[in-house]
Image (tube, rainbow, N blue to C red):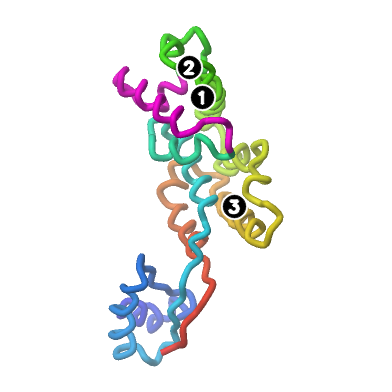
Amino acid sequence: MDSIAQLVASRDFEPGECAVMYRTNAQSRLLERPSCKRVCLIAWSVRSGSMDAERVKDVIAFLRLVHNPADEASLDRVINIPPRGIGDKTLMTLHTVARRNDTSAGVVLLDIARGSNSPLWSQFAGRSVIPLADFGASLANWASAAPALTVPELFRPHRQRSNYKAYVDDESEEGENRWENVEELRRLTLEYSTRTLDDFLEYGLWSAIRILCRMVSTRPRC
C-alpha cells in the first residue's frame, strides 16, 4: 500500500489503476489494517474475483504446449478439451508408455501421430491409441507452424477448433461470460501480433491476470 501511495503521489498513476492481489480472503485482513492507517485518504475497496476463468487457463495451457510439447501439466489440461474420447485411463496409459520409454507424454504423442509406423503404437491396447494419435498429429502441425505464426494466429486454431465454442458457451449467461473471457484473451494476443510466443508467455500472461481476476463484488470502502 505504501508503494501505491508513492505511485499516486508521483502522478504517474491514478488510484483506480492500482490493485493488490491475494490468494485467500484471510490475507485481505493483513492489507486492510495498515492501509486504513497509512493511506486512508485514498478511496479503496476490497473486491472478490470470479474464479470461473478455466477456459482462459485452457487457452494459455494450449499455447504453452505448442511452445513446449514436453510441458506435461499443460498437456494434461487440454488433451481432452473439448472432449475427444481421451479419458483418465487412456491418459494414464500415455504417461505409463512415456515413462517406460524414458521420454515425455508429448514426445509420445508426436511419435504415434505417424500411425502404425511408430514403434510406440503397439504399446497401446485396442483403439485407445487413435484419439491420442489424432491429437498428436494436430500438436505436430501447431508446433511446426509456430515459428512462422504470430501469437493471434496461434490462438486462432484453439479458439476455432471444432465444438470448442459450443463446449465453452452453452448459451446460458454463465456460458456467455466464459466465452467473453476467451474473447478478452484473444484481444490481448492482438497486442503481440508483431512479437513472439516467447514474449507473450513471458510478459503477456501478466496482463492475462486481469482477465482471471474479473471483479464481481465489493465490500464497503475504508
Measured as percent of width and height from the top left, residue 39 is found at 34, 88
Above or below residue 125? Residue 90 is below
Residue 182, numbered label: 3
- Foreground mark, 3 or 1, reads 1
Residue 211 magenta-highlighted: no
Q: Left of 212 or right of it: where is 8?
A: left
Callout 3 environment at 10 Å: few (<14), some (14 to 19), or many (20+)?
many
Q: Distance between the residues labelled 1 and 2?
A: 8 Å
Instruction: Give the secondary structure at mark 1.
Output: helix
Callout 1 environment at 10 Å: few (<14), some (14 to 19), or many (20+)?
many
Instruction: Give the secondary structure at mark 2.
Output: helix
Q: Are marks 1 and 2 in contact (CB under 8 Å)?
A: yes
Q: Which amino acid does label 1 sit on?
A: Leu
**Badge 2 is on which residue?**
112
**Badge 1 is on which residue?**
132
Q: Are marks 3 and 1 in contact (CB under 8 Å)?
A: no
